[in-house]
Structures are given as structure tokens and as C-alpha cells.
Image (cartoon, rainbow, N blue to C red):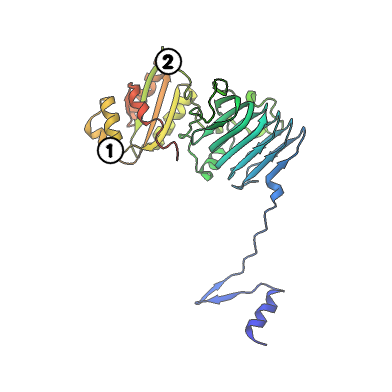
């Protein structure tokens, strides 16, 4: 019998080790196939379902026709679709693609995603971290707020989903079908209050010390009495900028954040408005710049401005300069 036939017969009963170009290709056990039912929740009534960290691992997920439920996807996902849900609380961890929620009502949602699209959704609260502009279509009585949640695996999951806390355009909504009562912008709400009652199985998994997100006031109107500052950190200072952003978030004075390339033209425009020097302009025109807009009590804002300056940041109270850079890269 020829060697090829021997190998074919042997392959039915034992692993085959082949040599190619002097190297041995070791046998590897085939990966087990994914079960699609592990990535869907359909037709649930009055149930609590939790997908813990590591159980989704970047796969897509479907939630459909659920009523009076608590659903927690505490892992990073690829894309998530939510359809025909009623009176259900839903948390979705870092999602590298889109979250679509459609034909749903009276829900409370907390999402971390690259893109959010809503269609035919009514009377629903959405606490959000979103890399791009949230989309509203044929929906009404939506309430958007900035998401504030933490658990030990969250920071790693953000990295796996390629999302940065500095990119959160949760309040910069785009409404395809604009009407006065389609949506509103709300102040941040404590996660356990927002999702109350939080299932007993979830509470031990949450941790304020592991909140890798930044809480910002976004496009909510600021009080005229509040002080404003734009802090800009040149390339190479991102780590220091992130620490200062975290401080501003905890103190409740972070309005917006971004991390984007300015380029020469925009750096020149912003520096002109801010009154910065030509060397500063050159420094800010190369690579990614972290920009933080602060709005709040004068003493808190001024203390953070002073700290930013010691960390190599450039500061101005000219809000027109902040308007130039606040939405750069929003379609990224």
C-alpha cells in the first residue's frame, strides 16, 4: 500500500505528524465549534441572565423578545442586536462594533460601544459610552446619560474592543427624525440606582475602584457661573493626561475629552485662539493630542489647570479653541 494511503488510513485512528522542509508540524487538536445558542437570549420572561467575563470573547450577540428581565453581558462583544424588548434592564460590555436596539420600550440600558443605533424605541433610558455619535431614528422619550460603571475586567475588555475612555461622544446625538421629545440629555446616575434593582449575582462583580470610564457632562448646558478651560497634552503625554482626566471626572468637572491628531492647520488655528507660541503649535501638530474640556467651580478648574501645566499640558480659557478640537475623529 502506498505511503499516501497509509497516512489516510492512519488519520482516521490517530494524529498524523508531517515533516515539511526539515520542520515538524505538530498535530493540533481542532478547536471546538461555537454553539450559536450560547450567544443569544430569546423569548425570556421574568428572568435574570448574566454572561460573565470570558463567556462571549468578542463574538456577536442577540437579545430578542425579552420582557421583564435583567440581562448583563459582562464581556467584550463584536456586535449586539436587541429587538422587541419590554421593561427590561440590559447591560452590554465593551462592543467593538455596533449595538442596535429596535422596536423596544420601557427599558433601562447601559452600553459601551463603538456605535449605537436606535430605531422605533420609546420611553427608554440609555447610559452610554460611545466612540461615535449615537443615532436616533423614529424613536421618542429617550434619555441619554454618561455611563459610570466599574468591574475588575473592564479595562482589559476596553483594550480588546479597541475603545478608549477618552473617546466618549455619548451626548452628541444625531437624530434622523428630529422632534422635540425624541430624546433628552440627563446628568450621570449611579449605576446601581440606574439599573435598580441590580441582581444579587451582579452586585459582587461591581467595583468603584475599577471604573475605567470617564464621567463627563457632555453637551448638557453649562451654568454661566461655571469656569471653563481647555487642557491640551502633546504626543507622549497621554498617560499623564489620562490621570488628570480621571481626576477631573471624579471631581465632576470633566465636560468632554478627545484624543486625535490636529495637524498643522488645526494646531495653528487653535494656538491662535488660545494665544500659544509657535513652538507650542509645532509640538501640537505632530501626532495625537489629548484634549480635555473642563467646566465647573472656579477653584476646582484652576487647580486642575495648574496641575496640567506641571505635567506638560497647555491651557486656555478660550472656549472657541475647544470647539475646534472637541469632535475631531468622531467618525473613527
* Residue where numbered disc 2 is placed: 297
Instruction: Tell me residue 314's x, y (percent).
Output: 31, 29
Asked if marks 1 and 2 touch (Cβ < 8 Å), the reply is no
In which image quadrant can residue 183 be found?
top right
Q: Name the foreground residue: 296 vs 42.
A: 42
* Residue where numbered disc 1 is placed: 264
Q: Name the foreground residue: 25 vs 86.
A: 86
Instruction: Tell me residue 130's x, y (percent).
Output: 52, 34
> Quick one: SS at disc 2?
loop
* Side (left or right) of 288 relative to 174: left
Which quadrant of the rendered structure holds the N terminus?
bottom right
Q: Is residue 283 visible?
A: yes
| Disc number lying in front (1 or 2) | 1
The residue at the far top in this view is 225
Disc 1 from disc 2: Cα separation: 33 Å
First in sequence: mark 1 or mark 2?
1
In which image quadrant can residue 6 be found?
bottom right
> Quick one: SS at disc 1?
helix
* Side (left or right) of 103 relative to 252: right
> In the image, is residue 277 above or below residue 74?
above
Q: Name the foreground residue: 184 vs 32.
A: 184
> In the image, is residue 26 above or below residue 138?
below
Q: Which residue does the image show at 77% across and 32% down from the upper left?
A: 46
Amino acid at each position: 500500500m502506498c505511503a499516501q494511503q497509509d497516512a489516510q488510513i492512519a488519520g482516521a485512528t490517530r494524529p498524523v505528524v508531517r515533516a515539511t522542509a526539515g520542520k515538524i508540524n505538530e498535530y493540533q487538536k481542532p478547536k471546538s465549534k461555537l454553539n450559536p445558542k450560547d450567544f443569544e437570549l430569546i423569548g425570556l420572561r421574568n428572568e435574570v441572565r448574566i454572561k460573565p467575563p470570558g463567556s462571549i470573547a468578542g463574538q456577536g450577540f442577540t437579545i430578542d423578545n425579552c420582557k421583564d428581565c435583567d440581562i448583563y453581558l459582562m464581556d467584550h462583544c463584536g456586535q449586539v442586536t436587541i429587538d422587541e424588548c419590554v421593561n427590561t434592564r440590559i447591560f452590554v460590555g465593551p462592543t467593538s462594533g455596533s449595538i442596535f436596539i429596535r422596536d423596544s420600550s420601557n427599558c433601562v440600558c447601559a452600553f459601551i460601544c463603538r456605535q449605537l443605533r436606535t430605531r422605533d424605541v420609546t420611553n427608554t433610558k440609555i447610559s452610554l459610552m460611545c466612540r461615535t455619535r449615537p443615532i436616533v431614528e423614529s424613536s421618542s422619550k429617550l434619555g441619554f446619560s454618561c455611563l459610570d460603571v466599574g468591574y475588575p475586567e473592564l479595562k482589559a475588555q476596553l483594550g480588546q474592543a479597541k475603545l478608549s475612555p477618552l473617546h466618549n461622544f455619548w451626548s452628541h446625538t444625531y437624530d434622523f427624525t428630529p422632534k422635540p421629545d425624541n430624546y433628552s440629555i440627563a446628568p450621570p446616575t449611579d449605576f446601581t440606582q440606574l439599573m435598580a434593582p441590580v441582581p444579587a449575582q451582579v452586585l459582587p462583580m461591581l467595583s468603584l475602584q475599577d471604573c475605567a470610564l470617564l464621567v463627563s457632562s457632555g453637551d448638557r448646558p453649562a451654568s454661566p457661573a461655571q469656569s471653563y478651560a481647555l487642557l491640551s497634552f502633546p504626543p507622549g503625554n497621554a498617560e499623564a493626561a489620562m490621570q488628570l482626566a480621571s481626576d477631573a471626572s471624579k471631581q465632576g468637572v470633566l465636560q468632554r475629552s478627545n484624543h486625535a491628531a490636529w495637524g498643522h492647520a488645526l494646531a495653528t488655528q487653535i494656538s491662535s485662539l488660545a494665544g500659544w507660541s509657535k513652538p507650542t503649535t509645532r509640538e501640537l501638530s505632530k501626532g495625537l493630542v489629548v484634549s480635555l474640556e473642563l467646566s465647573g467651580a472656579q477653584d476646582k478648574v484652576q487647580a486642575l489647570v495648574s496641575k496640567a501645566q506641571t505635567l506638560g499640558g497647555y491651557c486656555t480659557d478660550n472656549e472657541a479653541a475647544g470647539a475646534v478640537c472637541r469632535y475631531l475623529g468622531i467618525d473613527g
